[in-house]
Image: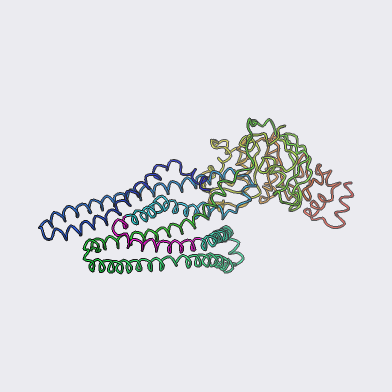
Amino acid sequence: MIKTLAKSIREYKKPSILSPIFVSVEVILECLMPLVIVLFIDAIEASASNGELMRVILVYGGSLIVMAVLSLLMGMLSGRFAARASAGFAKNLRKDMYYNIQNFSFANIDKFSTSSLVTRQTTDVTNVQMAYMMIIRVAIRCPLMLIFSLAMSFTVNVTISWVFLGLVPVLAAVLVVVVFKTHPIFVRVFHKYDNMNRSVREDIKGIRVVKSFVREDFETKKFADASEDVCKDFTLAERIMSINAPVMQFCIWLSFLLIFLLAAIITGKAMEDNNIAGTVTGGDLTALIMYASQILSSVMQLSMVLVMIIIARTSAERIVEVLNEKSNITSPENAAKEVKDGEIVFENVSFKYSEKAEKFALSGVNLHIASGQTIGILGGTGASKSTLVNLIPRLYDATEGAVYVGGVNVKDYDLETLRNKVAMVLQKNVLFSGTIKDNLRWGKEDATDDEMLRVCKLACADDFIQAFPDKYDTYIEQGGTNVSGGQKQRLCIARALLKDPKVLILDDSTSAVDTRTDALIRKSFREEIPNVTKIIIAQRVSSVQDADQIIVLDGGRIDAIGTHEELLASNSIYQEVYYSQNKVGGNAAQEGGAAHE
């Protein structure tokens, strides 16, 4: 995990190294200052009799001021480099995750929910960023401060310094308990974060449905429950971590008490033995109290760092999960860079969405579509119509068998080449915030105004675009909320046509347009792009009845292939759909079928 995350440090290695160096210098200066104070106090006591008090104050006082200023400067530099390193590290992490997500296949995307990916890009990265800053600064400072302060305290008084060695294990034991108790809670709470974010996302995305069904109270309660669930776990974790502070305060005051007690005992015994050198001086006492504060505060800060690392560890695992997820669909070496034509062949193709799935979504599909043909696909809900066409641009890979486009197995193509020549208008039409031109240029970045005008006329979109005050510069809101469903579909079709594809797939992409407009779009396709293979998935028979061939899917298998007349005469599924849509039922349907036979 650490190795994977470390790859995102890259150009921020220098500040990541400089921060600990400056911290180390800061710690050394802070540990030397109590020792200088000891000498200062002792020198004051000695100089009171010889009249050199001012010189002592200037020498030692000046030294302390210089050391304090240098320590402050080192701390500021350390903080600056730590902030730069952690912010840069977080930036790279987000970029690396985002770039990797862009390479995901549909199968990879299916493993993560949208809300989970958003949480990982935001909350999880922020947690890791804070932990990284703590590690390269505070986590370096605390152990160094602990070691140096202990060493320096032994130079002052060995006997009293054993107090610190006795208290440190007590604090360490408390830290270990906190770490082991809180980590599983944070693992659980981040999954609940995903659920809460999913609730927010669903509510905002479907706000019109929520309002139309007057379900605001229900959605509010659902979010409140999810939020309360997160709150309970965080409260439990915070309750466990709150043990740190009182234990730390107890140890600090206990150490002060023991220092004074031992100092009194040692001094009293030395006085009884007339051993002035063995007494604990005021300077020694001051230094030991300062070292006690440094040692115990270092352990306290270290506990805070460990808590942050506990939280970040869970976040880091979730981030690494995304970074390590590799697309199962990639371009092969020496990949084909040209799609010759729009011929499509399915050769004994079967497909299932997961290796663990017991049932195939598609089974034994054999199909040949000549270049330039118009193919209609019809079938009930769940017949795997979308699944079938998703295999053509290799959005998924066939589990068994092979799919060929232009005489080449789709697995042998360069992905960019294949998907540029197989334009697909998905079932869920998506427009992005920006002008109409910006959205159209997703099909071709350098498209001219004439090219955009041509494809919009083909998609019957030019008429309504011209009706807008800003025409092609009309701003589209996020998700295309300021255009109708039919307008959105036609803009998506125009965007796909700009790719100048060999194969055009319309996955139920004219369902929101009226039958007249649907007919005009199909007519323009026949007349203007006759050499492009067109695959039309539709619920309306009228949308596919003039196709060269119509494929009837049922339960992931091809039930029949034929023209409108052939299927109307021989296929019961097609007959049922046709007569139900033409308001002919029962006996009339059977008579109609018999007449065609």
Using the image as rendered, state which of residue 312 and residue 459 is in the foreground.
312
Does residue 90 sit above or below 258 in this rendering?
above
236 or 219, which is in the foreground? Answer: 236
Q: Is 272 left or right of 94, judged from the image as shown?
A: left
**Which residue: 53% across, 53% down?**
120
Inspect the magenta stretch and tell me whether residue 353 lies in it: no
* Residue 224, horizontal then vertical, whole percent: 54, 67
Q: Main secondary structure of the magenta part?
A: helix
The colour scheme applied to this rendered structure is rainbow
Question: Where is residue 340 shown, x and y percent of the image?
Answer: 68, 30
Q: Which range is magenta? A: 152-179
Report if residue 160 lies within the magenta region.
yes
Of 485 and 320, which appears nearest the observer?
A: 320
**Horizontal side of residue 271 vs 149, given as left or right:** left
Furthest toward the front, the residue is 273
Residue 348, horizontal then vertical, whole percent: 78, 40
Residue 553 x/y as whole percent: 78, 47
Q: Would residue 13 be found to the left or right of residue 57 on screen?
A: right
Give the residue drawn at x 36%, y 62%: 164
Disc count in the image? 0
477 horizontally vs 421: left or right: left
